[in-house]
Amino acid sequence: MSSPTYTRNPADETGLVEPVAPLGTDLDRDLTRRPSQLSALRRGKGLVGLTLVLVVVALGLLAPLLTSYSPREQIPGANLLGPSSAHWLGTDEVNRDIWSRTLHGIRVDLLVVFIAVPVGAALGVLVGLVSSWFAIADVVAQRVFDLVLAFPTLILAIALSAFLGPGLLTVGLVIIAVELPVFGRLVRTSVRTVREMPYVEAAQVVGAGPVWVLRRHVLPNSLEPLTVQLAVSMSVAVFIEGAMSFLGLGVRQPEPSLGSLIRDGIRTMYDAPWFAVGPLVIVVALVLGLLLMSQALSAAARR
């Protein structure tokens, strides 16, 4: 194999000298064969998980087209009816179609999963990056993280509900508060690990600044664990929404949510045992899909 040659990149303001391997070398073939982490979602458990999540998302987005009744509509004479062609999952104690409420309830979880979790992750990454480079900010951030993590999630939810009242906003803020220290410490650990690598020290010796090191070395090496944690946090967010709505701290009636539907189903379990089946199946499918995706991404990151 021919030895690599070295060249100076004129566009690089630091003047770093980078090795350039000739085409056809073993290094070039290794780089071209290296699989992407997202390719893990195209096969095996990753594909199964992605399919489950996409099915649930499609059901939520297409809810108005897949239902014949409004989730708030009270149908005359339809009190606790069993599953039928007119009402696929039956009706509840106030004559509302459970199929319609279940599909519209998915939208609440989608808002929580795809808005609150990324917002918490972005804030955590920002805090983790800043605190890892400044000692005072690091001390303050870690003590705040300790304070947030010291409270169980439900205790934090009760405290926020006491000030803000129950609702979707409270659910979102609880999830953001829970996820912020998780991502903050994950990024902080990645920064401290990568910062001690020889190639980072060499870059700093020749004049590379903190922003350049973060952009070129730290963030690319942190993407894989962040992607895995994002999928795990999304599955946890579904549980948090379900638990808060189950306890009456989340979405309030008459708006539907999967957690509140499960609570209502348990209340009428003896009169209508089929009530909670639909919401439970949706929750299991969504959480299982996200967990399978996280496992596939984690396995790909270890290769």
Image (spheres, helix red, strand yellow):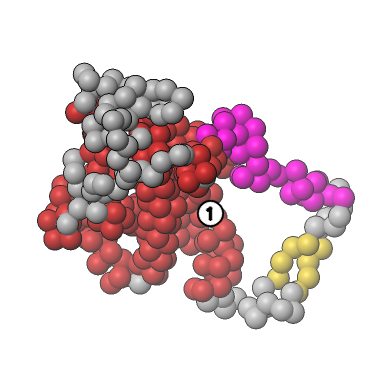
Q: Is residue 57 visible?
A: no
Dot 1: what SS? Answer: helix
Q: Is residue 156 magenta?
A: no
Quadrant in which residue 41 is drawn: top right
Quadrant in which residue 88 is drawn: top left
**Residue occupying image coordinates x 74% and y 49%:** 31
Amino acid on which the number 1 mark rests in the picture: Leu
Residue bearing the label numbered 1: 223
Residue 175 x/y as whole percent: 31, 52
Describe residue 299's horizontal placement relative to residue 34 as left or right.
left
Q: Is residue 50 magenta?
A: yes
Residue 271 x/y as whole percent: 22, 20
> Nearest the camera: 106 or 85?
85
**Residue occupying image coordinates x 40% and y 34%:** 99
Image quadrant occupied by the C terminus: top right
- The residues colored magenta run 24-52
**Residue occupying image coordinates x 60% and y 34%:** 47
Residue 78 x/y as whole percent: 30, 30
